[in-house]
Image (cartoon, rainbow, N blue to C red):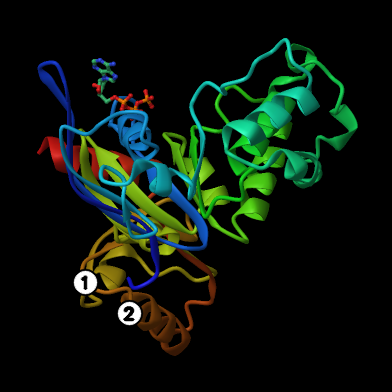
């Protein structure tokens, strides 16, 4: 990848005795939403805290926009906005006061603070709550303020640690929408252990388990990771099991109803075309044929077990 905003090389982190991250290598591009997926305790927060310079790695290198985080932390951190798992909010401040404070912390010149605050409030849909004290905002709006502080200095990479944790379903949809919106102009790396979250929000997935990367690819590649090996077929004139089992590649047929059966096959999915062809030739009156995809949960479980095995 020529245009990467984040590159991690051989990253290790140990808390006293226990290794939380072991040899993580990652590279992410300059646009889109990148999901860092993993079950609880997989090492996501540790990795994110290291990327954002909150934690020093035991070993390994992190480059933000080509800048070595260890050698040049101030320069590297200019490119990053971070929303940790618990939003760093001063809940006695109102939205304007808090975002103004964050802008100054990020080194924005005094004369530009007002414009920066107005811009992120607009972007995050919180302009109508400018004078509202943070502790009186709902969880979803507090999270919006958390995202606003993460983008106040217009970073090229925004890192969000479980950004929809603890939100209700409507708030989750709104936050996902906001994340996609801010990823139009930059790269967003978000961590989650919730599978529908990555499906709904991410273009690319990096999955870590027990501190190691176990999957790296697009959402389609993730969905197709475990190849389907069965389909369900409904025919007006379904032949008996033995007839179907004679078709090369079909391993076993399980009758579900008089007109419907589940077919287990080995080899490629071309077998479906063959069944359709046979159905026309033999006048079996095919009504429906559906490949049974592995559910995302089962892919997740398989990838989690890959490391254990
Ligand atoms: N401060 C700490 N001291 C000791 N061990 C820690 C510390 N923080 C995390 N760990 C351990 O390191 C491992 C990775 O934890 P981490 O929080 O990075 O995982 P995670 O994927 O973010 O999990 P979650 O989704 O639950 O936040 C876990 O086994 C965890 O118990």
- Which quarter of the image is occupied by the C terminus? top left
Answer with left or right where residue 57 lies relative to residue 40. Answer: left
Q: From the viewer's side, name the closer residue of 188 and 37.
A: 188
Q: How many marks?
A: 2
Q: From the viewer's side, name the closer residue of 215 and 186.
A: 186
Q: Position of residue 25 (x, y in %)?
A: 22, 51
* Residue 34 shows up from this direction: yes
Q: Position of residue 49 (x, y in %)?
A: 36, 32
Residue 220: quadrant of the picture: bottom left
Q: Residue at x 24, y 37 (%)?
A: 209
Answer with left or right where residue 123 lies relative to residue 194. Answer: right
Residue 255: give its label: none
Q: Which residue is mark 2?
A: 270
Q: Residue at x 79, y 13 (%)?
A: 136
Q: Bin the neighbour count of mark 2 within 10 Å (Cα to Cα): few under 14, some 14-19, many 20 and up.
A: few
Residue 152: quadrant of the picture: top right
Element under disc 2? loop
Compared to residue 286, the image places residue 222 above or below, namely above
- The residue most toward the right is 128
Distance, label 1 to label 2, CA atoms, is 8 Å
Compared to residue 18, the image places residue 231 above or below, namely below
Compared to residue 218, the image places residue 287 above or below, namely below
Element under disc 1? loop
* Residue 120 shows up from this direction: no
Answer with left or right where residue 194 lies relative to residue 222. Answer: right
Q: Are marks 1 and 2 in contact (CB under 8 Å)?
A: yes
Q: Which residue is mark 1?
A: 267
Q: Position of residue 301 (x, y in %)?
A: 29, 39
Q: Residue at x 48, y 47 (%)?
A: 78
């Amino acid at each position: 990848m020529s245009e990467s905003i984040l590159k991690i090389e051989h990253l290790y982190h140990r808390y006293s005795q226990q290794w939380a991250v072991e040899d993580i290598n990652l590279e992410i591009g300059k646009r889109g939403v990148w999901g860092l997926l993993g079950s609880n305790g997989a090492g996501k927060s540790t990795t994110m805290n290291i990327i954002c310079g909150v934690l020093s790695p035991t070993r390994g290198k992190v480059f933000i926009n080509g800048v070595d985080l260890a050698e040049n932390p101030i320069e590297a951190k200019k490119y990053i906005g971070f929303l940790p798992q618990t939003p760093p909010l001063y809940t006695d401040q109102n939205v304007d006061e808090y975002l103004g404070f964050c802008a100054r912390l990020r080194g924005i010149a005094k004369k530009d603070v007002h414009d920066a605050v107005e811009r992120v409030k607009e972007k995050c849909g919180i302009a109508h709550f400018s004078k509202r004290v943070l502790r009186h905002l709902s969880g979803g709006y507090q999270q919006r303020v958390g995202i606003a502080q993460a983008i106040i200095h217009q970073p090229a990479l925004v890192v969000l640690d479980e950004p929809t944790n603890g939100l209700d379903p409507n708030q989750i949809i709104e936050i996902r929408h906001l994340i996609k919106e801010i990823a139009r102009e930059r790269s967003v790396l978000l961590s989650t252990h919730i599978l529908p979250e990555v499906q709904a929000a991410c273009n690319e997935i990096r999955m870590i388990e027990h501190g190691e990367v176990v999957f790296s690819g697009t959402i389609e590649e993730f969905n197709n990771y475990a190849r389907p090996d069965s389909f369900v077929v409904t025919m007006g004139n379904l032949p008996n099991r033995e007839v179907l089992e004679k078709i090369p590649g079909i391993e076993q047929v399980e009758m579900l109803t008089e007109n419907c059966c589940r077919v287990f096959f080995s080899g490629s999915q071309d077998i479906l075309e063959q069944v359709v062809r046979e159905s026309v030739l033999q006048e079996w009156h095919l009504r429906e044929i559906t490949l049974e995809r592995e559910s995302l949960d089962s892919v997740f479980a398989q990838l989690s077990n890959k490391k254990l095995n």
